[in-house]
Amino acid sequence: MGPMDLRQGIGLRRLGTTTDEFQQDLLSSLYYRRGTTVESASAHDAYDALALTVRDRLADRRARTAAAHYASNPRWVYYLSAEYLLGAQLEQNLLYSGTGEVAAQAVKALGRSLQEIEDLDVEPGLGNGGLGRLAACLVDSMATRDIPAVGYGIRYDFGIFKQSLENGGQAERPDDWAFQGNPWEFPAPDDRQTVGFYGHTEPIAGSQTRKRWVPGEIVLGEPSHMLVPGYGTETVNIVRLWRARGSEASFDLSRFSAGQYAEAVQEAVRAENISKVLYPDDSTELGRELRLKQQYFLCSCSLRDIIRRFRLRNSDWADFAAKTIIQLNDTHPTIAIPELMRLLVDEYELDWDQAWSITRRTFAYTCHTLLPEALETWPVHLFERLLPRHLEIIYLINLLFLREVEARFPGDNDRLRRMSIIGEGDERRVRMAHLAVVGTEAVNGVAELHSKLLRETVLQDFADLWPAKFQNVTNGVSPRRFVKLANPRLADLITEGLGDDGWLNDLERLAELESLADDAAFMERWRAVKRANKVDLAAGDPDSLTDVMIKRFHEYKRQQLKLLHVITMYQRIRQNPAGDWVPRTVLFAGKAAPAYHAAKNIIRLINAVGATIAADPVVSPYLKVVFAENYNVTLAERIIPAADLSEQISLAGKEASGTGNMKLALNGALTVGTLDGANIEIRARVGEENFFLFGLDAYQAAEVQIRGYNPREHYEWDTELKAALDAITAGRFDGAGRELVDSLLGWDEYLTLADYRSYLDAQEEVERAWRDPARWTRMSILNTAHSGFFSSDRTIADYAARIWRVAPVTVPKEDQ
Ligand code: GL4
């Protein structure tokens, strides 16, 4: 039986493609799977019935994909990530299954509009920010590029918290995202895994390297998967998410019978806490024990699943690395390296050298940061207690590794100390980034500058030792989600301009728009699209310059710099109300980690400044500050199409890449930015005349810090800067922001004041361009035209060719 016969082989009918057939299936889903009728169906019944009906349209492609992959026994890509920000599923799956139009007709039978039903879609917020959304774009592009792949992650009960404003400050509520159930998910209890924690190790007679680990706690990992369809292809891959459960033995029936109800379930509760909640920190590391438990839980479950899958088709461990590549999304899943060693050596009885050779060829590591506070380290004593066997394995890996270093650089003890996997400070700590570099075949940064700085700074010693191991793979974004779904008006205009929609999976074709950048009729329509998107967003006057800064709140990203600009604009307008001011709507959105007080203070100040301006009849006609609550993928999809100006103003050398910068440029926003992360590559492609550059570059910034930076000099010298800071200190904005001023004048870690004047100059250039609509529109079209490189399809092509060395596997069509 060929793969195309899967359904016929078991006598199943094919699902119809007409509206009538779709409607029949929809009503059938409602009746048989939701167990209700049209008359009594709730809105959620309608949502679920539609979701199931759409999901069914992908199930056959999934079955054919699995069969084709199985038959070709390829090298599989396993993406290990603690975070996935998948975004809303219904609209995506309607698009990827080509059922959007029939569904819009068919739902009328339920007495509801498609829009109404889509509004019920809750996005699984299983990530913090850029890193989690990147994982989602990459799995989308792996499927689109026909790469056999599985994304592994954690099915957190609670995703990233819901943010609201209370008295101008951030308040957090838990995100019970699957409260209404999740129709997109297929539970697979048969593939459940058992994971150990704590306990001790025992020697095994006759073996030097093998040990028996006797865990003190046992937890079950139950997988479920969500479908990841490719666009314009048959492939449907999966993301497999693990949820922790107590074993049967974790329920203490005797205690329950004795009326000790809380005690009876305490062990089960402890187990289930592992996948209870996503840690809400982006680019910082708190070092909590439960976090390490989450990481190990993800890695142990996933590796056992990977091995199970390998053994379905293969019998020789010598083939493992040729059939398996495991990409580590940052250091969070690095514990997979000693875990694979443990499984191979202790459980499958391979000798150490063979196991190590397999392990090193199986893993690759992507680093997503340069910030020291984001580089994970764990106290040795914590490891010893939680994962005693893994610590022994890490010690042995380290010993052998340091011997290798010693052989290359004899007598260089300083180097040994710097490179060791164990850091010997006040407290001995396991350095996960070092372990990740030592245990992998390839290490990559996520933009040119970032990869270069990794080699020159944090990982310099490792780059000296293994220069060929270090690579760059510049990030990318999915044009399906961030243009087609988010910005249908622009997508239609592009398709019309190019003659077809082939650009959706061949994004470099956007370059063909260049010839339309001076076409008056096209330019007019381009402007009309942006305006209509602004009307939809309804954040401010659609004719004002919509200036957006949307990202996590972090001092290195410098929302405070944008805010100082806003305050200066406010003061200028007040001083000269009759001036010829460019009306602006400044829109901020983003979450701050709940324990990150400095970031939360910036949110508070933004809202206080916004309120002051709104209450000022002189300034408010020209300037409006909006804080959009609860930034997530769904909100990003509304804001990005409406943006005129994209704020990418991190201190150079701090933002590894950025991906919002790509999404905004792709949607025709112009960037004001520093020479940081992928901004550099965006500017090189869209042209320096179409990008507003300012600020110190990464090397200059480092030099300023080394020479000894005094922020007060800028304050004393720059009267506008002084006036802005003094206004905050004087309590002009409801008293908010004084801690910010103290930190800016005290040390200003991210050189905000040093870049202030250059930033304001760039903003004047922005206004000059804006006053000339033809010039602005041309620049906008050229930004879109030259952003094709930033498709995550290109990113995946790079990983596939240079890191994974895998080729696509074509899934046959149904009737081939
Ligand atoms: C991040 C980087 O901060 C961000 O620049 C990058 O675009 C993203 C994806 O590579 O990864 N690293 C961490 S940690 N969070 C991020 O968003």
Image (cartoon, helix red, strand yellow):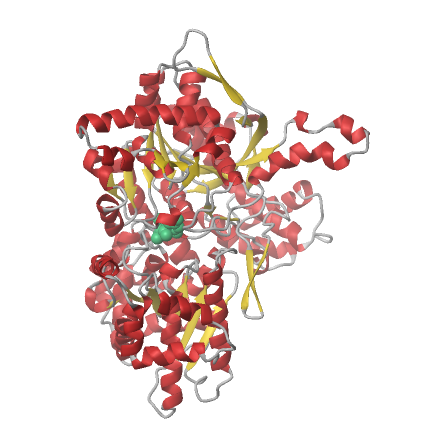
- The residue most toward the bottom is 578
Query: Residue 391's image quarter?
Result: top left
Instruction: Using residue 807 as the reference point, say whether residue 170 is left or right of it.
Output: right
Rendered location of residue 414, percent (x, y): 24, 36
The C terminus sits in image quarter: top left
Rendered location of residue 694, percent (x, y): 25, 68
Query: Could one spot residue 536 in this view of the protein?
Result: no
Give the residue drawn at x 81%, y 30%: 258
- The residue most toward the front is 426
Instruction: Answer above or below: position of 197 versus 86.
Output: above
Instruction: Using residue 24 as the reference point, say whether residue 152 is left or right of it.
Output: left
Rendered location of residue 566, percent (x, y): 39, 76
Instruction: Using residue 110 as the reference point, say whether residue 425 is left or right of it.
Output: left
Query: Residue 318's image quarter?
Result: top left
Instruction: Using residue 249 as the reference point, say whether residue 797 is left or right of it.
Output: left
Give the residue drawn at x 35%, y 82%: 582
Rendered location of residue 11, percent (x, y): 55, 28
